[in-house]
Amino acid sequence: MKNMIKKLRRTIVFLLKMALFASLFGIFFGIFGINNPWLFNLSRTTGVTMVTFVVLGIALMSVYGGYAIGTQKSKPIVHSMALATIITDLVTHFQLSIMNTSQFNNDHFVYETPHLLLLVMVLQVAVIVLFAYFGNFIYFSLEPPEKCCVISASRESLGSIIPKIKRFKKQYQITETVRYDSPHVLDVIGRNDTVFLYDVPTRERTSLIDFCYQTQKNIYYNFEMIDVVSQGAKYVTLDDKSLVMHVAKDLTMEQRIIKRLMDISISLIALVITSPIMLACAIAIKCEDGGKVFYKQARLTKYGRVFQVYKFRTMKEQNSIHKSVTENDDRITKVGNILRKFRIDELPQMLNILKGDMTVVGPRPEMLENVEKYTNELPEFSYRLRMKAGLTGLAQISGKYNTSPKDKLVMDLMYIENYSIWQDLKLIFQTITVFLKASESTEAFGKEEAYDFDDDNKHDA
């Protein structure tokens, strides 16, 4: 019965994806076809335009996460699908305007019917909202929450992972929590469908993963250094021996040249485009308290070199103590709170990129005080300095201000281990999503919730 429901669910998800894409395609070409009847004729021009929409749409949906019903909440699905669709519309509409520049239509380039483009986007977003919420409703009607157990080493670890799981109540139902060294741990795993292993020592974690794999349980576990290394490794055979090979990585000469050219181009374009925004920010900061507009702070980049990072000042000048922001931090100004919320305070870092101190995509440039503190706790923290510090990156996009240093470290090292120009381009496009989840990504450091292990499985620490 379960297998039949799973097959039915996969079929429904596939049909919903096809119906959604067909609707977006139909809205675009149906509305623009009114003024451009040639779009309804079979021709090379029609084919090129339609292929552009399909190929670019699929590629961008892949970059932003796509129609991920069942794994994402409805709101993030709307954000990712809307972004991918709007960018696809803009590019295809621009191409449409170029193709209409001919002796039969416009004798010079005209950006045609922008009001129709706006109508198309509004209708498409409405359709995306409908499909996102309806799709998740159908999915979770067929698929009840997975029965989960959380296996960890301490109450503090439980307080770190359980609130994250509880944000996805439709996907996961926590039934039990147990210490990894409890005599009941295998029984607990057997009673559940999904197992979360968090902060379990590597040796014991390996044993528990083996048992979960043997009993066909879904497994989630947090990254350790061995997992980061394995991400950058590949399978090889030496004669008839199967081995895992990890090669120490550094950028090739070609990658360095392309990355630097991208940095210069993007920073110059960004400075020109955002100059009105930066001017407005400068005026707002100056009007609020009359203090300095810009703020400089020592940060670390590749090989531990110290540089001065440029930012818009978001704190009161007399209280600009070098420490991470906490919840309800009274050092932040009213203007600064808005700038931080939408990450606008980081725009002046384009000057650091142009100078060569930073790159567009790379590990976060941490404060010197934090580097010393984190390295004492996590010696692997220094591995991040193998690449130049970046304005955006995996940790900046997926993480928050209050994401733990270890989780940020993992994200930075994952970026380094899987580096490619294509990954840089994906992360640049994904940076837009930071503005759509501004309230979440700028959460400050606060107190973690307290959780305890289930009484039946409680084990003396």
Image (cartoon, rainbow, N blue to C red):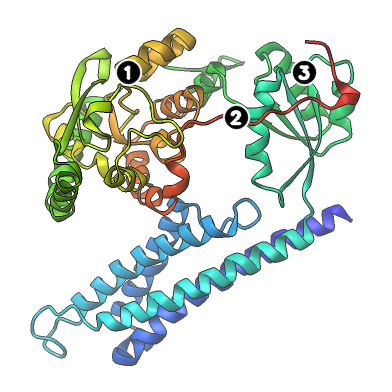
Q: CA separation, marks 2 and 1?
A: 32 Å
Question: Which label sits on residue 386?
Answer: 1
In the image, what residue type sits under mark 1? Arg
Question: In terms of sequence position, does the residue under pointer 2 or pointer 1 come before the other?
Answer: 1
Quadrant where the C terminus lies? top right
Task: Answer whether residue 130 is visible to the viewer in this image.
Answer: yes
Q: Position of residue 418 (x, y in %)?
A: 42, 30
Front of the two marks 3 and 1: 3
Asked whether 321 or 453 is in front, the reply is 321
Residue indicated by mark 2: 448
Task: Answer whether residue 198 is visible to the viewer in this image.
Answer: no
Question: In terms of sequence position, does the residue under pointer 3 or pointer 1 come before the other?
Answer: 3
- Which of the 4 quarters of the picture holds residue 120? bottom left
Residue indicated by mark 3: 180
Farthest residue in the left direction?
108
Which residue lies at the image location 35% right of the left edge and 42% below the top edge? 422
In the image, what residue type sits under mark 3? Tyr
In the image, what residue type sits under mark 2? Glu
Asked whether 164 or 181 is in front, the reply is 164
Disc 2 secondary structure class: loop
